[in-house]
Image (tube, rainbow, N blue to C red):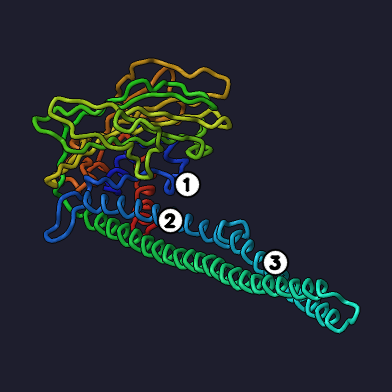
Amino acid sequence: MKIRRTLATAVALAATAPAVLLAAGPAFADAAAAPSSSSSSASRTEGKPSVAELERAVAEARKAYEDAVAARSAAYQALEDALSDTSPLAVAAAGARQKAEDAATAKTAAHQAVADAQAHVDAVMGDEKATDDDRVAALRALAEARTAADAADAAETAADAAAAAAVEARDDAEVEASRAYGVAQTAEKAAKANLEAAEKALADAEEDAGDDESCVAEPDLAVSVSGLPGRVAAGTTVDFSVRLTNRTRRTLDEVRPFVAVHATGTKGERDLDDLLKLQWSSAASPAWKNVDRNGYAGAVGPLKAGAHADVALRLTVGSGAPAGQGVALTAGDYVNDDGSCGGTPDLTVHTFELVAAGSTSGGAAKPTTSTAPRTSGGSPQGGTSVVPVSATTTRTGTLAATGAPSALPQLALASGVAVALGAGATVVARRRRSARSGA
């Protein structure tokens, strides 16, 4: 599927705007979207999970990893809080320690008072001039001092116990927070390893599916584009949409629109892909999201026979983009719960003009259709042109397990694009090497 859609992309670019392809070189090879559809290998190998199941496993593993990262972050914050001098337990321990110190000071003072009272009693008892009242008062003061000292001893003992308990509670909380952080770190590592294993299993399955020929061309899955202007000004955002229509007689469980945009300077002197941002939104997923690295704008379904679904698209061109030309490529793939899969046999190309910042985006509301290949790299004038690249023209084999059109036979398109296809084949070969090497 990766090679298949890339081949179709190369053919389309060669047939419609050779300058875009010829100027792209290695940069295009690295940046071009080469989709890896869930429908590409959805058929199940005996005893093995399908690609769709592996994709769900990757999504679940990624969610688990994200949750583990969040849990580890929360555990780290909890540890920081536990170790802080301002934590409730730390404040309580400090307060308890202060009370113990105050109780110790009070005990020392109380025992000094006992010593002083005893000295006074000794002095009064040895004084011949002292009266009986003096002696009674001195003995009473000594008794009171001893009572206060006993109370101070008990208060110190209680304060020491309270301080020890408060410090132990603080220390226990710090130890527990540290243990929880360690557990969270271990869980995060395990979740990351699970995600990497799931991603590798999916990549291996997609690689294995490259030779699967169980998917079929489905001309009754129609993909149409509305609202894409023929001119797009730098520094602006334009909205358009793609409609997926199921003209078959059965329900398609999941349908994925493939959308990719590429652009170069007017004479192909510069690859402008890094200045293009393509996002999608649908009724089921209204928040704007980037088209994924494989060129898929989400998924819709189930799509019943005769029904259609729309996916909104938003193209933003950086304000620093120079005048140039661009292409938007669209197709559609599907995969059913029973493992059957397929896709549109045509990859459709819409060409548009990039105009300088401050200009007005616009152009013909309805695209024109042409089957003649472009022979110059000039920008299209006055609107959007559409060139369907059909896999059925020279089909000699069956589909790869991707729901995309037949792959290698597309290289045998009209001789009018043979020279440009040489560059296209180079790009495809480069993509093939990078895809297989994991680049």
Q: Secondary structure at mark 1?
A: helix
Disc 2 to disc 1, how far (Cα)?
39 Å
Q: Which label sits on residue 102?
A: 3
Rendering coords of residue 422 (x, y %): 36, 45
Q: Secondary structure at mark 2?
A: helix
Task: State whether residue 375 appears in this view.
Answer: yes
Q: Which label sits on residue 315?
A: none
Q: Amino acid at mark 1?
A: Ala
Few, some or many residues within 10 Å of mark 1 (<14, 14–19, 20+): some
Tell me the residue at 18%/42% (across/down): 335
Q: Which label sits on residue 71?
A: 2
Q: Amino acid at mark 3?
A: Asp
Q: Secondary structure at mark 3?
A: helix
Residue highlighted by disc 1: 27
The C terminus - image quarter: bottom left
Mark sitting earlier along the chain (2/1): 1
